[in-house]
Image: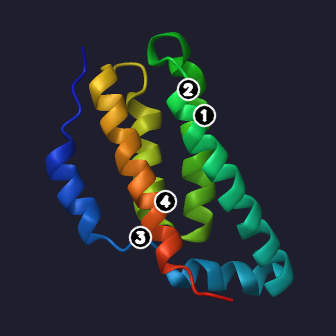
Amino acid sequence: MFDVTVAPARKALDAAPAREPRAYEALVREIGEDAACEVRDVFWSETCVRLQLFRTLSLAQHHARIAREAHSLKSAAGTFGYLRLAALALRLEETAQGLGEADFRALLDLMDAAYAAARAQEPQV
């Protein structure tokens, strides 16, 4: 069985900003403010659903799907500069097959916290 060490990684992730504001600015320059805002809204909605989905899937039976969903989340979070969430999604993508149930749940808790932190750092429009 593959064990994930959450505590040291958590400290490093907590030190990193939840959001890199320049990433969104770059997206705005590329596709415009309205389109970037729409895409970000879709990201928030899909990410919320995806985080809930992870909690309904059996790790033992669905590790391949969990890894695919984590890959998609990692890519989307990276596009918007949600660094902590992208890093945690990458960790889930890379370790889904070998994670134990407790480590999986702990990683999901960290992902939920990273999502909440990213939302909290979003500028209010």
Mark 1: few/some/many CA within 10 Å (<14, 14-19, 20+): few
- Pointer 1: what residue? 53
- Pointer 4: what residue? 115
Quadrant housing the C terminus: bottom right
Q: What amino acid is labelled 4 in the image?
A: Tyr
The span from disc 3 to disc 4 (Cα, nearest Å) is 8 Å
N-term-proximal mark, 2 vs 3: 3
Give the SS element for disc 2: helix
The span from disc 2 to disc 1 (Cα, nearest Å) is 5 Å
N-term-proximal mark, 1 vs 3: 3
Q: Is residue 112 visible?
A: yes
Mark 4: few/some/many CA within 10 Å (<14, 14-19, 20+): many
What residue is shown at x 58% (from left), y 86% (from top)?
Answer: 123
Q: Position of residue 66 (x, y in %)?
A: 55, 28
Q: Position of residue 28 (x, y in %)?
A: 74, 84
- Pointer 2: what residue? 56
Q: What amino acid is labelled 3 in the image?
A: Ala
The span from disc 2 to disc 4 (Cα, nearest Å) is 18 Å
The answer to whether 75 is drawn above or below residue 19 in the figure is: above
Say if mark 2 contacts mark 1, CB within 8 Å: yes
Q: Is residue 24 left or right of residue 63?
A: right
Say if mark 2 contacts mark 4, CB within 8 Å: no
Q: Is residue 99 visible?
A: no
Nearer the camera: disc 1 or disc 3: 1
Q: Position of residue 74 (x, y in %)?
A: 54, 50
- Pointer 3: what residue? 18
Q: What amino acid is labelled 2 in the image?
A: Thr
The answer to whether 21 is drawn above or below residue 103 in the figure is: below
Nearer the camera: disc 2 or disc 3: 2
